Amino acid sequence: MKNSMRIITSSWGPARTFKMIPTTKECPYNECIFDVNTKVLAIISKESKESFHMMPKLNDVGDIQRLKIGKKENGKDYAEERRALVTFYEYYIEDKAEIIDFVMSVGENAESFDFQQYINLEIPKEGMMPQNSIITSLE
């Protein structure tokens, strides 16, 4: 597992960030992506599980079945049904030191890629201008 992922530049919403992609078949993860707004590293495993999700109900031609009575309490104006879906296990690392340790242990280019610029990035408050080019817009 050591050095089984490559760190690359990516985007998450309006901000630039880093992402990790597998470089070996033995790597246990599909991808990792760092959210600069919440300072969380999301890790998507290759291991899957079956779980139930509410999905839009489809009519006979495959279109979403709209409700005739308006919106439900949850704000949706379409019918839903519970479906079993295969999803991948997800893990979230929130502690800064643990994120750095994980990236250093799994990232084959962790020494040469400056991923910590994204971890240390201060997100401007609403109405403030970005301090650098990592943030591409404020929405």
Image (cartoon, rainbow, N blue to C red):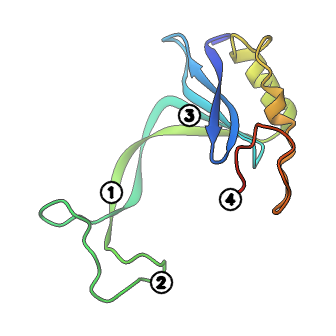
What's the residue type where badge 1 is placed? Arg
Which mark, residue 67? none
Q: Secondary structure at mark 4?
A: loop
Task: From the top left corner, tell me how far across and down residue 116 is, in percent.
Answer: 83, 28
Q: Which-is-in-front pick, marks 3 and 1?
A: 3
The residue closer to the viewer here, 17 or 49, is: 17
Closer to the observer: label 4 or label 3?
4
In 3D space, how far apart are the residues under numbered discs 4 and 2 (Cα atoms)?
Answer: 27 Å
Residue 54, image x and y in percent?
Answer: 39, 62
- The quadrant holding residue 70 is bottom left
Where is 3 relative to 73, above or below?
above
- Residue bearing the label numbered 2: 73
Relative image position of residue 6 (x, y in whole percent): 63, 16
As helix, strand or loop, the secondary structure at mark 3 comes to strand
Q: CA distance from mark 1 to mark 2?
A: 20 Å
Q: Is residue 79 left or right of residue 3?
A: left
Kind of element beneath mark 2:
loop
Q: Nearer the viewer, residue 48 or 66?
A: 66
Which residue appears at 44% of the width and 40% of the height?
49
Residue that label 1 marks: 83
Residue tagged 3: 44
Q: Nearer the viewer, mark 4 or mark 1?
A: 4
Rendered image quadrant of residue 131: top right
Amino acid found under the numbered disc labelled 3: Ile
User: Residue under circle 4?
Assistant: 139
